[in-house]
Image: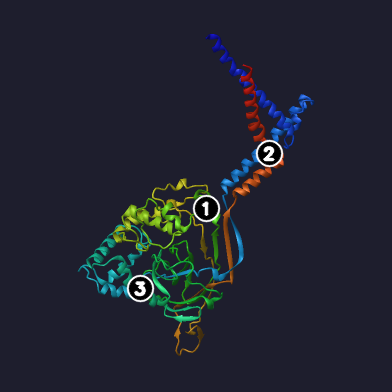
Amino acid sequence: MKKVKMQSQEKLPITEAKFWTILKKQAAEFCHETGLHGYKYISQTQRTKTERIIWAIAVLASLSCALALIDKSWSYYSSHPTLTVIESTHHGIWNYPFPAITVCDINRMSYNLTKNFVENLKTPANVSKESLIQEMRLMNELIIPGIFGSNADVERNLTRLQDIIDDNKLSIIEVLNLITHNCSTFLTICKWKGTADRCDRFFKPSLSRDGLCCSFNYFTYPDETISSDNMVKSAACGFETGMTIIANSEPSDYHAAIIGAYGVKVMIHYSFDYPDFNSEIQLVQLNNQHFLSVNPSEMYSTPEVKNSAISTRQCIFNEEDDKVIFQNVKERNLTYITYSYHNCLAECRASIVRAKCGCIPYYFPQNSTRVCNLRDIKCLKKYKSLFDTSWPELKQDYKNLPKTHNIRGPCGCIPDCTLFRYPIESSAGALDPTVYYNNGSFSKNPRNAFSIQNHSIIHVFFNDLVGFQFRRSVNYSWRNLFASFGGLLGLFAGFSLMSIFEFLYFFVIRVITDACINSIRHSNTY
């Protein structure tokens, strides 16, 4: 028994020795027969040992350089998965939707409307109508918390004003609608593509970061019939082919302005984007004519980008928001038709205010959450730095903002894979107070015309017949990587696709075959 056991123990080293003999033999034959550069000199036994070692070092150094460059190529691919290039500088203007135009009166509160509103209010006996008219200016605190400072008198007046509003069973939105000019009063004449009509045919009341405004070609609430294909477009350039607006900003009616100037604020933005401070903004002075020329640009993504992982392409398509960003969100705070990075930021800000103060500011197009009132101003002012910033976060340490590129922005928002941008160029001139306006023409004759004094004229139009089109595509596909890696290996080692088959043939197939043959011969000898 001991003799048999010793024989079985001796078989293992003998088998391993034969295996290494076979492997060395195949390695020598591989080096002699392969087409890879330098290997045949290593296997030439007639050469000196020093010469063969030098060739082995050269081959290893060449392979190391190839692998190092491959690693750098892979690192660059990992950090630059997509590439954005200018596909066309002559993309037809008819391919771009006309931008949305949101016009806001710098005067947030009409004095005459406020006076009529206060006259019809049921007020306490110890509050005079005149003082209440002045206190109504505190409604601007809902737009910019802390604009009137922070002291006990302001807080006491805010609470008293809210008590009066509650006693009259009015909501914040109802009050603002009663003291703000409607679109048909604020906008006197509107002219689209050379055809003049009532402004309420084009402009609808809307909510923006500046409160109640009037918007053209802006869509907020879900509607399946609205898409980028049937939006308003213009196939020509020049101010006569766009939108012309005459706004009435009566200086004598100013009661609570958001800035110290007379005129209107114009925001140019994409039709599905909430008009926030990130829109293209232009202040239009009173008694001036402004020309806002739009130079649109579009960025689209190729199908290969959509097939890539979101972590790779670092952007999101409109239809993916429910699965990626809002998957665990039971109820959204705002209403919008389609996802965009700007809409996501607005949702983020509204969520922060709701989490901290239990309400949402009235200037957001919200679902059914409680609207912040004047009693919430103290809370809004306290947490303003959390939501009214370029990086809103519920728990944010601004000393540790990300210094490197990150796919997810504030509140997990991800940039758009497709988007339209509308940068503007503006020019302006003062209006002649002695000139009258009638159906698009100016004259000195007041007959059948009206004076443009204390008005502002705004022209929004495409600047050119063509625009820029950008394409986002995959920077390195598998074909690019295959060619890049193969080129590096071919340059440094003469590597080709057949070299893989050579390696498999010599070190897999022939090693197994020789091992099986030797095993059969060994078993036959016993």
Disc nearest the viewer among 2 and 1: 2
Disc nearest the viewer among 3 and 1: 1
> Eyeballing the image, is 58 above or below 299?
above
Left or right placement of residue 387 versus residue 308 in this view: left
Residue closer to the observer: 89 or 127: 89
**Residue type of the residue flagged with mark 2:** Ser
Within-10-Å neighbours for mark 1: few <14, some 14–19, many 20+? few
| Mark sitting earlier along the chain (2/1) | 1
Residue tagged by mark 3? Answer: 110
| Furthest residue in direction top, as rendered | 2
Distance, label 2 to label 3, CA atoms, is 83 Å
Residue 499's tag is 2
Residue 157 in percent (x, y) is at 28, 62
Residue at 38% x, 55% y is 384
Left or right placement of residue 32 versus residue 374 in this view: right
Left or right placement of residue 246 versus residue 162 in this view: right
Residue tagged by mark 1? Answer: 307
Distance, label 3 to label 1, CA atoms, is 54 Å
**Residue type of the residue flagged with mark 3:** Ser
Residue 67 in percent (x, y) is at 64, 38
Disc nearest the viewer among 2 and 3: 2
**Residue type of the residue flagged with mark 1:** Asn
